Amino acid sequence: MSIGSADLTSLRSIKEVTWGVTPGSGNLTQIRFTGESLDANTETVVSKEIRPDRMTADLVPVGQSAGGSFDFEMSYEAFNEFIEGALFSTFSVPLAVVAVAGDISSDASGFASTESTKYDNIAVGQWFEVRGFATNLGENNGYYQCITNDLAGNLTTSPVPPSVETPSGTDAEMHGSMIRNGIVQQSWSVEKRMEGLTATTFQMFTGSMVAGFSQNYAVGEILTGAIELLSKNSDMDETGFGGLTDTAASTNDIYNAVGDVQDIRIDGVASTQEYQTLTIEVGNNLRGQKAIGTLGNIGVGVGKLDITGNISVFFESKSEMDKFSGNVPFSLSFRLLDANGNAMIYTFGKVKYENLSVTAGGENTDLVAEGSWRALLDTTSSSMIQIDIFPAA
């Protein structure tokens, strides 16, 4: 007898072209995870037939709900596809803005170029990483958010560059890619592979859409999260998906929620608040659509996007309470940076507190303001969330 072990279980996925149809070829990519609850729940009804022997005649299947969630430790690139699925969008084509004959320069308000179309692919609100400046040990290098772009070679940014400089030749570069929430539905075929048994067993989920995505930031912790999937249906066999090539997961370092979280900004200015915890919850309000003659879902209905979270900060002044009591909107952004230089920037252009309170929990404790927040439509970016990514140089 071979009893299965969780340590010999793996998850893999491939993006579908048509909802519910597993591609016949391509890469079946391994998913990094710490635990999972993917399963198929068959709904049954007990027969109400009356018998003279008092026995139950049957247990009849009447429906199936497939999907579940998997937990993860956040690392750069590992979950980009599922972030795309959660936001119903895709990452933009990476910027490749490279100087030619010194045509990129910094000034007191941002960056300029003698080439009028140099910055045409940088969107207002987008973050980009600057490399290749050398003055004062490269103080102009770093991450900047585009505030205005006149499409004539002039950007204003936040923050502004520390000094005026024009690197020579092709030294200066700008990089980055971003995603904002959209309306493009995407789905995956997901395979749970259970090895170490008499025969390797596979549980397959098709038509899997991202119902939810969450992240948890806490002092002294790894950055963790979860992805919730709603699937068309599920099946189990000893062969798995055919015709696909197993592909290893990325191996980038895991982010921690302490030193790897940098440059928290409120309304575009470096925050003076000290944070204890922060959570992000993205929900798509998906619903399985069922019909007579089909076991499982015939489709997935899509609801309104909800982006919420909880927060706790050391209480130092009433400024945060004023935002809550006055229903004042604000923007929130922060950067993740691993030891190898892979970065992500999360931006919520318009946020309001749903609740916030300060309590004295007991003796020998600090005052902490705790509450929840909700992201709203930011009319400047026409989005509720933006995530920018920057691979290491």
Image: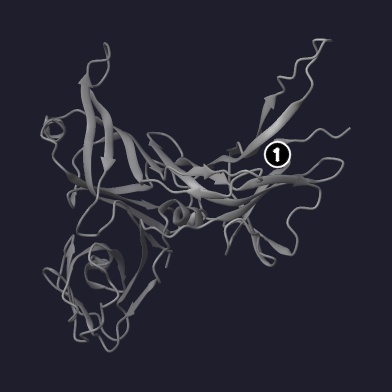
Label 1 Cα neighbours within 10 Å, binned few <14 / some 14-19 / many ≥20: few
Which residue is depicted at the point 25% across and 58% down? Answer: 382
Give 28 or 379, whichever is nearer the viewer. 379
SS label for mark 1? helix
Q: Quadrant of residue 285 in the image? A: top left
Quarter of the image for residue 51 reads: top right
Q: Identify the image quadrant of the N terminus.
A: top right
The amino acid sitting under disc 1 is: Asp
Colour style of the rendered protein structure: one colour
- Left or right of 146 on screen, residue 244: right
Up-down: is 234 above or below 319? below
Residue 73 image point, x, y percent: 51, 43
Is residue 274 visible in the rendered image? The answer is yes
**Residue drawn at x 41%, y 64% as measured from the top left:** 91
Q: Front-most of 366 and 36?
A: 36
Q: Position of residue 262 (x, y in %)?
A: 31, 48
Please state the horizontal and vertical placement of residue 52, each as a whole percent of the image.
82, 10
Q: Is residue 310 left or right of residue 273?
A: right
Q: State which quadrant residue 50 falls in.
A: top right
Q: How many marks?
A: 1
**Furthest residue toward right:** 1
Q: Position of residue 227 (x, y in %)?
A: 50, 44
The residue under the point 85% across, 44% down is 199
In this rendered view, identify the residue nearer to me: 91 or 378: 378
Q: In the rendered image of this protein, does residue 131 appear above or below residue 276?
A: below
Q: Residue furthest bottom?
A: 101
For the C terminus, the image quarter is bottom left
Q: Does the rendering let one see residue 76? A: no
Name the residue beneath numbered marker 1.
7
